[in-house]
């Protein structure tokens, strides 16, 4: 009897997880493929965190990936969640504070493509001290200006 209950709970948990992740993965896949065609993310069933990146049939654990690849995955997952929130009428800005520090020059251009593709529906704020590297991203550069007091 107890084993039947445990099995039913595990089945329900798995089903709930699949329902939760299906929309996230649907938003994530096109952005992920801008960087790596035919790539997939695997998620840990217990922690619900990305556990591996599968490219060309080879699964690489997240911990073994370069810092740049990990930060790119993190950014794309954040964009996927922001898109889901926006689709449900709960718009949330995506704030990126030097989020692409470890990204190489070639891949940063593809990340910019992903950001541009999402910028029409999302508010994306990019904070960085790397002005030259991010110049191609476009957008408006914020400045601080003094304001004269009203007389």
Image (cartoon, rainbow, N blue to C red):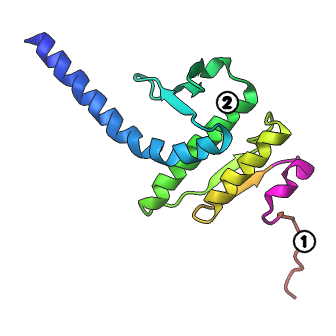
Residue in the image at 23% along x and 29% along y: 12
Question: Where does the image place residue 34, in percent across and percent down from the top left?
Answer: 65, 45
4 vs 112, left or right, is: left
* Segment colored magenta: 128-140
Residue at the (86%, 64%) spot, across then down: 143
CA neighbours of label 2 inside 10 A, class few (<14), some (14 to 19), many (20+): some
Q: Can residue 149 be seen here?
A: yes
Q: Is residue 148 positioned above or below 52 on the image?
A: below
Decide: is 93 above or below 47.
Answer: below
Q: How many marks?
A: 2
| Residue 122 image point, x, y percent | 59, 61
Say which residue label 1 marks: 146
Q: CA distance from mark 1 to mark 2?
A: 39 Å
* Residue labelled with disc 2: 70
Q: Quadrant of the N terminus?
A: top left
Q: Quadrant of the C terminus?
A: bottom right
Instruction: Let me know if residue 71 is in the magenta part.
Output: no
Query: Which label was assigned to residue 99?
Result: none
Q: Position of residue 16 (x, y in %)?
A: 29, 35
């Amino acid at each position: 009897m107890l084993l039947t209950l445990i099995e039913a709970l595990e089945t329900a948990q798995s089903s709930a997880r699949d329902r939760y992740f299906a929309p996230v993965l649907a938003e994530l896949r096109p952005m992920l493929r801008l960087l790596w065609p035919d790539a997939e993310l695997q998620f840990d069933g217990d922690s619900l965190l990305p556990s591996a990146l599968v490219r060309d049939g080879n699964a690489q654990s997240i911990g073994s990936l370069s810092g740049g690849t990990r930060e790119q995955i993190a950014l794309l997952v954040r964009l996927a969640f922001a898109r889901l929130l926006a689709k449900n009428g709960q718009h949330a800005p995506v704030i990126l504070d030097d989020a692409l520090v470890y990204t190489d020059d070639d891949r940063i251009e593809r990340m910019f493509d992903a950001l541009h593709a999402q910028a029409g529906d999302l508010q994306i704020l990019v904070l960085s001290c790397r002005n030259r590297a991010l110049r191609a991203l476009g957008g408006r550069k914020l400045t601080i200006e003094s304001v004269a007091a009203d007389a």
